[in-house]
Image (cartoon, rainbow, N blue to C red):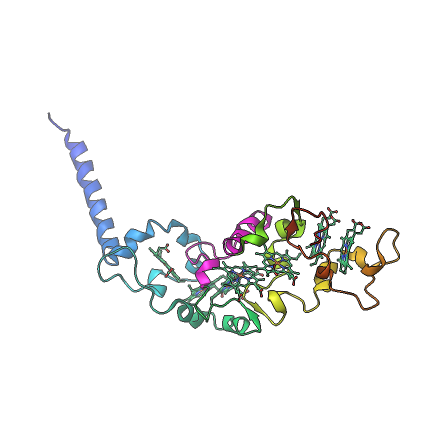
């Protein structure tokens, strides 16, 4: 069968484009190949800040698809994020320095680093729930704060001087940020023990199942 010359030319051109592309990507062979698995990198905060694959990875020596990290992950991240270790040094913290949790357990370093907005709350919660299933539900009686505002409405993700990574030393202040009713103890129907002006107990001493409950709609034990 006779092939039209124009068609042959086009094929040669295509081949040349292909070869050029191959040369461009052949240098960090493994990483370029792997870039296909990280197409979202170009839209990431890291890419926007001018980082490339080799800011974090060594070029793979064996042509494999996983370039080793230049350094231990925590050292690598903290070289650029010098303010981060401060939080992890606080009394209550995720054991990253201890080697039990990694930055990349919560952060997708290859994608838009921090999703935001209500649609992203579920995704952010999911990054916590994969290790803390007991807080994630589903529960018969959900606490809307967990689903709508997310874990970080009450917890610091890195570290806190307060127990259980809470954002306030006094747990009642966290609750009353949303439940203003509890300060108004004279309101009809609000039990006297919600009075915050006389030795209030921690809300969680009664509402212990604060993430949600299958038995009590007010999250009692
Ligand atoms: C900000 C640092 C950083 C940059 C930039 C970066 N990576 Fe990564 N990469 C990591 C970390 C951290 C891991 C997780 C390593 C581990 O689990 O031990 C990783 C893991 C990987 C893996 C293993 C599979 C996976 O997804 O976990 C591949 C493949 C990879 N990176 C390719 C790339 C490519 C290709 C680029 C550029 C498009 C890139 N990386 C840019 C930090 C980075
Ligand atoms: C070569 C320097 C460098 C390295 C290494 C690096 N980062 Fe970054 N990172 C940046 C820069 C620059 C930005 C964008 C400016 C900023 O927010 O500080 C950024 C942004 C981020 C953000 C988003 C911050 C925001 O407010 O949106 C997160 C989260 C993050 N990096 C986590 C990591 C983690 C986890 C690692 C280790 C796997 C890492 N980075 C390694 C330089 C680096
Ligand atoms: C337990 C999950 C978790 C771990 C582990 C974690 N982060 Fe984060 N990090 C978060 C969340 C969630 C935020 C967003 C905080 C917010 O928006 O209030 C954040 C915020 C950040 C930011 C944005 C600036 C800031 O400080 O708020 C940077 C940078 C960052 N993390 C880097 C790191 C590095 C580096 C490590 C490892 C040393 C790490 N993170 C480990 C969950 C985590
Ligand atoms: C890779 C697994 C992992 C991920 C992901 C993770 N955690 Fe943790 N978390 C831990 C470990 C391990 C501890 C320390 C447990 C201990 O010391 O008993 C911890 C401790 C905590 C504590 C304190 C518990 C206590 O009794 O003092 C809270 C609260 C917490 N995490 C919330 C979160 C939130 C919120 C997120 C998401 C931003 C998250 N965690 C993501 C593993 C994880
Ligand atoms: C409305 C505030 C609030 C929200 C939202 C919230 N927590 Fe908590 N969480 C608390 C309080 C308060 C405690 C401490 C309970 C206590 O001391 O009895 C706690 C304790 C914890 C603990 C320690 C174990 C325990 O049960 O004592 C973990 C782990 C935890 N939370 C994870 C999460 C995760 C993951 C999310 C998101 C899915 C989340 N929390 C959302 C308030 C909250
Ligand atoms: C970010 C806001 C927010 C925070 C913080 C918060 N809550 Fe809630 N909570 C809500 C919302 C919204 C509802 C659902 C109210 C409704 O349906 O009328 C709710 C429901 C409840 C209920 C069930 C009773 C009812 O009216 O449905 C209890 C009990 C409760 N919260 C206790 C607490 C305690 C204890 C804390 C502190 C550990 C806390 N909440 C922190 C938003 C919050
Ligand atoms: C001594 C135990 C105890 C303490 C402490 C406590 N509560 Fe309650 N709470 C209850 C009981 C019991 C009810 C149900 C009262 C009823 O139905 O008459 C209730 C009801 C509620 C309700 C639902 C009110 C309604 O209208 O349905 C909310 C919200 C609430 N508490 C929040 C809080 C907050 C916030 C704190 C801390 C400032 C707190 N509670 C401290 C035991 C307690």
Q: Nearer the viewer, residue 27 or 114?
A: 114
Residue under the point 84% across and 66% down: 197
Residue 188, given in percent of the width and then of the height, sits at 88, 52
Against 143, residue 94 (above or below) is below
On the image, the x and y values in percent for residue 146 come to 63, 52
Q: Locate residue 130, reporting x and y percent.
A: 50, 53
Range covered by the magenta-colored residues: 102-131
The reply, left or right, for residue 193 in relation to residue 61 is: right
- From the top left corner, tell me how far across and down residue 49 is, in percent: 44, 62
Residue for point 41% across, 58% down: 47
Residue 116 visible in image: no
Task: Specify whether residue 119 is painted magenta.
Answer: yes
**Quick one: quadrant of the N terminus?**
top left
Quarter-of-image position of residue 150: bottom right
* Labels in figure, total: 0
- Kindly identify the residue that appears in the image at 81 percent across and 69 percent down: 199
User: Camera-side residue: 32 or 137?
Assistant: 137
């Amino acid at each position: 069968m006779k092939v039209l010359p124009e068609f042959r030319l086009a094929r040669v051109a295509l081949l040349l484009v292909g070869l050029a592309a191959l040369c461009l990507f052949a240098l960090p062979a493994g990483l370029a190949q792997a870039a296909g698995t990280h197409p979202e990198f170009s839209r990431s905060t890291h890419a926007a800040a001018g980082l490339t694959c080799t800011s974090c990875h060594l070029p793979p020596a064996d042509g494999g698809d996983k370039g080793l990290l230049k350094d231990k992950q925590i050292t690598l991240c903290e070289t650029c994020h010098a303010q981060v270790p401060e939080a992890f040094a606080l009394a209550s913290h995720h054991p990253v320095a201890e080697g039990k949790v990694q930055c990349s357990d919560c952060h997708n370093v290859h994608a838009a680093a921090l999703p935001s907005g209500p649609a992203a709350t579920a995704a952010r919660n999911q990054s916590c729930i994969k290790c803390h299933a007991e807080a994630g539900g589903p529960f018969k009686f959900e606490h809307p704060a967990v689903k709508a505002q997310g874990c970080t409405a009450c917890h610091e993700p890195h570290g806190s001087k307060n127990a259980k990574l809470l954002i306030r030393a006094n747990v009642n202040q966290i609750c009353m940020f949303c439940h203003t009713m509890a300060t108004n103890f004279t309101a009809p129907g609000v039990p006297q023990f919600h009075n915050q002006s006389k030795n209030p107990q921690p809300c969680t001493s009664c509402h212990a199942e604060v993430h949600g409950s299958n038995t009590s709609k007010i999250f009692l034990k």
